[in-house]
Each structure stands twice: as structure tokens, then as C-alpha cells.
Image: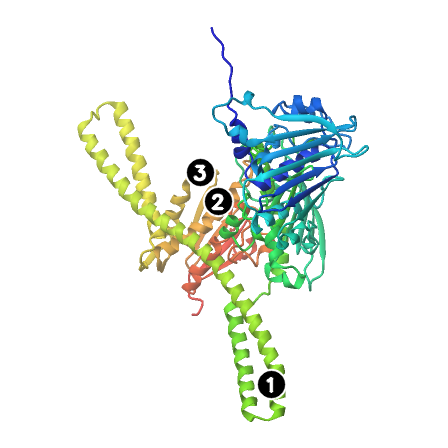
Amino acid sequence: MEKIRFTPKARLIKILGEQLIKDATVGIIELIKNSYDADATEVVITMNSLNTPDAKIIIRDNGTGMDLPTFTKKWMNPATGHKEEQKENKERSKLGRLPLGEKGVGRFAAQQIGNHLSMITKTIATEQELFVDIDWTKFDDRSKDLSEIEINYEMQISKSFKYKKTGTILEITNLKSEWTIDEIEKVSNALRRMKSPFKGANDFDVKLKFEKCPEEFDKYANLETSDILDKAHYTFFAIVNDKGDVDYDYIFKMPGFKTEKQSGKANILTDTGKRFKHYELDSKVKVGDFLINLHAYTVDKLKASNIRREDLKEWCGVSVYRDGIRIMPYGERGNDWLNLDNRRIQNPGDKISNDQVIGMIEINQDENIHLKDKTNREGLIENEYYEKFTSLILGAIIIFEGILYDDRQKVKPKKEKTSNEKIAEKVSSVTTDLDEIKKKVEESDILAVTETAPLLNKVGQQVTELKQQVTDTIDELEKDKQILFNLAGTGLAAERFTHEFAKLISGAISSLERLKKIIDLNNGKIKKEVDSINGALEALKNDIRLLGPMFYIKKTAKEKDLNLREIIQNTISLQEPFIEKAAIEMIIEGDSFNVLMREGSCMQVFNNLIDNAVFWCSRKSEKDKKKIKIILDEKDKSVYVSDSGPGVASRYRDKIFDPFFSMKGEDGRGLGLYIVKEILDEKHFGIYLVTEDDYKGLLSGASFRIVFADSND
């Protein structure tokens, strides 16, 4: 058998640089990480003569540098794996660092920034420095193999590193693109957030300088971190482990309110209501302990805390740090990798959005060895370890949201005026003041004109406040619109599903009837299969018939005289698969009575209540007795829905009918009970949370009384 070897073309280097390094910002970060791996304590990035023919970017560090053997045998041989071996063997540097890189592609980051690289490097062991000159355009030649491209280097008298100084200087020229203000700002922000503010890499500092550049670039040289974290309204520090245990400290600090602190322990699996996929908390998938720091803000209280909205927008998001150095792109503007915004749209009352939180997840290479970078430096490899990692983070966030809920309600006035009411009030005040000014001007005496000045100042201030309130109102309307669009889309999709699926089932039943006429039904096996298909189609047809009234939204359905027992039994039929799966015993007691309502609305009332009862009963262990009891009381025109679940904690009893409040964690939108109450309020009916003591026969969990009598009578 003959043998052959791979002969990569020279342009492979270009492909690696452009495909594995996203942009210049990521390229610069990767080169800084190389300095970190070389035990540098300082890295200085100098941007010189940008957007001119002489433009260059110089990255200088004071690390250990490279000797000639390291350059020829390791730097010139990507993917040698020497850094990976260091990690596996826990070989730390003199400064106690494990290397951040491992695949050997970071050196190609320079090729993403410019077409020419000059490198000067020196170690403590040599008096001479190594000079390397690379023209990346040579690698564009498609006709040449990689082995045909030569790189110039030489050992020279040390000019850049005097005496015992060591380090590396990278000078990148022939830049590939112009640098706009947006790109400069992006690099500056990335460098500012590169180090964790809590567990940043020890003795490692990064500086940014501009020389012979436009003056507007100078302000981006300031890499000092903001004090916005110290002003956070809600702060959550926690250690999370593989089992979902969360050991936390929480601080509530809001202007005008007493600062409160609490510490505690919780478990993501048992305390959040979050449903995990089978592998997300698999005990065999070891992620390791990690730290989570969350800083959340109430947007309309930013001014009181002396926080600029622009600063929050710049810093918001959840970042991930390894050994104190940030992993891109988590936490970048617009990078909502945990889908926090989508969660808030589904349930805005008690969820935090990506633009309300500044988060830092801290991992390290000793504890979290299975969380590895993608080769293209675009985050972590998304495998089972990553899935478990993100699930644990979201679980910790749910615990945080549960703790801060009461404080958020405390900050928000019970009966706060709507934005429209505030605007109307302000317009009325401005109008009154303008009338007063007009009156004084018409009097045309010196005193009146003098008295007008304070009123004009007052009007100006009111107009400024009015503009801000209009802006806030627009923001609120946009958020409400998002929620309504989401819910409307769900309703439309459900209606279309029931309509189209009903036609398909009807067609399938007709086809099956025709099929019966042309096949041998005397064959036992064939008849059994046909009967099974027929039974399944009839069951689906019945389910769609039951769902239809709930989702028919094109026109308002007419009210009917409904038998409540029939409505309840139809609703139970919809929930039957879930009731059977959870092994719940259903009990219906009492004499039925009729009520005048729209069928779909009435079914929604019981469907939401039974759905909640099924959910909470299913959370109990198999050994526990799971029951749902429905009692019809014809005399009082009432129906009781009671379950044997965990019940409603006393601190939540006044909140359960509030829109978007939910105790289900990720599984709840907080709309079910709110919709039930709205439907009943429209008819002047009522719903009340009751206990075992309020009515004979109720179970130990949550119990609701629905009164089908006009409350105005």
C-alpha cells in the first residue's frame, strides 16, 4: 500500500487567522492573553497614526519573552500542545499562572489586524534579543505550499530591552482597515472589562495609548473601571456547585430605603420550580464549583443613585471570567446568551432582563477543567458541560429573582400613577403657569415682569421633566407592545393549529373509512391496527373540539347557559395525559348548576386552575398522595378547586392574582390566575384563595373558591 502526506497550502495561515479570530478586538485580546501566559505584569497597547499610511499598533509586555529554541520549536509549530500539557500537569508559572491558551492559534491574531508583523523578544537568559519579520501577504499565494514560505529572523544586539529587562514587542503595520470611533470604543470597553473586578488576574495591568491620532480617540485611553457596581440596587454573591446548591449573600441598597443584607442557602432543583433536562444535572457531568456575582438595577431609580443610563447600557450583560480574565463574547453589548430578555417578555413582573443586570461568572482552570474555549475564541464549547453550566447559572438567577421580588415591590408604589397620568398632570401644571405668565405680562408693569422670571424657570424645569416622562412612557409602551405581540402571536398560532388540525383529522378519518372498504377486515391483525388508528383519530378529534372554544379569536363568542360539571369534565379530558402521568387522583363532588358565560372563557377558568394544581401535585414525590378535588356547591353558586400540593406561602397570598407573578420559576408566566380573575371580574363573579378551615372537605394544598354570582347583586 502506498503512502502520502498532507501538504497544506500557504493560505491555510490566512484562513486560520480570519476564520478563527473574529475581528481586530478579539485579535488584540488574544495577543494580551499570550502576554499573560508569559507572566507579564504590564501590557501597553499603543495605537499610532491610525487611518494614515504610517498607521501601526504596538503591543509591548514585560513577560518572560522567548528564546530561539522556543521560537523555532514551539511558536513556529502551532498546535504543539505544550500549553495544554502545562494545564493537565498543573505546571504553574513563577507567578502561579496556568496558561489561558492551549491550541496555538492565538499567534495568528496579529494577521487579523494587519498584513505585516515585526516581533522583538528577549529572555533573562540571553543578552541578545530575537527579531522576527513576517509578511502575511506571502501566505496569500495559492500556488505555494506552507513549507515554501520562509520567515526572516535573527539574533541581534539588544536595543529594546536594556540590562536585565525581558518581554515581547509586537509591531503590526499595513493595517487591514480603518479604525472608526465605534471600533476604538469597542476595543476600549473590551480592555476595561477584560479583568474581573472581583477576582482579576494578580499583578496584571493593561494600558491603552494613542499617539498621532485624532483627538477624539484620547478619551478611550482611560481604562479605569466604573463605580456602578458599588451603586447596585440589588446585589447577589453566590457559590454554586454541581448538585445545584447555592450559598449566597444578598444586599438591597436603594436611596431612600434602609440597606438590608441576608445570607442563605438554596437548591436550584428543589427551590426554583425549574424543569431540567435529564443531562443538565447529571451527577456524572462534573462542571465544578463556580462563583456568580449579580448586580441588578431598577431603571427609574438610576438618577437617584447618580447612575447614568449610558453607563448601565455599556456594562450590562453577564460576562464569564476564567482565572480573572474575560472569555469573549459573553457580556458584550447585545450578547444575551442566557436569553434573559426573552424570559422577561414572557414574565416581566419578576424577571430581570439583560439590560438591568451586570453579572460576572468566575471559573478557573483547576475547578472547571471541562469548560473549554472554542477554537475560534467565540465562547465555550457547547457540550453537555456547557449545558449544565448554563442551567446552573439560570437556576441561581431564579433564586436571586425570588429574593429581590419583595424589595422590588417595596420600591414600586402600590398605586403608582401611570406614565400617561403623570404626563397629563405635568401638562396641566405647565398650562397653569403659562396662563399666570400671560396674565402678568398683560399687566405690563415692571413688578409683574420681574415676577415672571421664576415662573419661566419653573416652566423650563417642568418641560424638561415632561420630556423625560414622555421618553419613559415610550419605553414602557414598547415593552408592553413586545409582551402583547408575543401573547397575540401565541393565540393566533393556537387558533390556526386548532382550525387546520381539525381539517386534517377530518380528512384522515374519511380516508380511513375509505380504506376499510378495500382491505380485509376479517384479518385480526389488520382490524386491530385499523381500530387503533380510528381510536387515536377520534381522541384527537375530541381534544380539538374541546380546545376550539378556547382559541377561537376572530369574533366574540356568544354566551351560553353552561352546565358547570360538563365544562369541568371536558377540561379534565384536556389535562388527562398529564393527570395520568403524575398519578393524580381526580375527585368531583357536589351537585352541578348552570351559569351564563362564553364556553371558551369558562373552560379557561378551570383549565388554568386544574393546570396549576397538576403542576404542583406533580412536584411531590411518588410516595405522597396526589389529589385534586373539585366541589360544586349549587346553593352558594360556588365551585372549589383544591389540591394536595405544597400550597401558597403566606408572603405570596396577596400577590398570586398579580399579572406576571409566578411561583413556578422558569415554567411560569404569571398570567394564568390573572386571566382567570379578569374573566370572572368581567362577569362580576369572584375568585378567592381559601384554606381547609374555610370549607369542609378541602385538601391541604392550594384551594380556590369561584363564586358564580354577580357581586353587585
Nearer the camera: disc 1 or disc 2: 1
- Distance between the alpha carbons at the discs numbered 1 and 2: 68 Å
Say whether marks 1 and 2 touch (CB < 8 Å): no
Q: Quadrant of residue 379?
A: top right
Horizontal relation, residue 602 to residue 479: left or right: left
Q: Earlier in the sequence, mark 1 or mark 2?
A: 1
- Distance between the alpha carbons at the discs numbered 2 and 3: 10 Å
Q: Secondary structure at mark 1?
A: helix
Q: Position of residue 108 (x, y in %)?
A: 59, 32
What amino acid type should be assigned to the residue bearing mark 3?
Glu
Q: Secondary structure at mark 3?
A: helix
Camera-nearest residue between 339 and 661: 339
Q: Earlier in the sequence, mark 1 or mark 3?
A: 1
Q: Within 10 angstroms of label 1, few (less than 14), some, or many (20 or more) residues? A: many
Camera-nearest residue between 344 and 62: 62
The residue indicated by pointer 3 is 580
Residue 378 drawn above or below residue 209: above
Q: Residue furthest left?
A: 517
- Distance between the alpha carbons at the discs numbered 1 and 3: 77 Å
Horizontal relation, residue 478 to residue 149: left or right: left
Q: Earlier in the sequence, mark 2 or mark 3?
A: 3
What amino acid type should be assigned to the residue bearing mark 1?
Thr
Q: Position of residue 306 (x, y in %)?
A: 67, 61
The residue indicated by pointer 1 is 452
The residue indicated by pointer 2 is 614
Q: Secondary structure at mark 2?
A: helix
Task: Tell me the tag on residue 613.
Answer: none
Picture colour scheme = rainbow
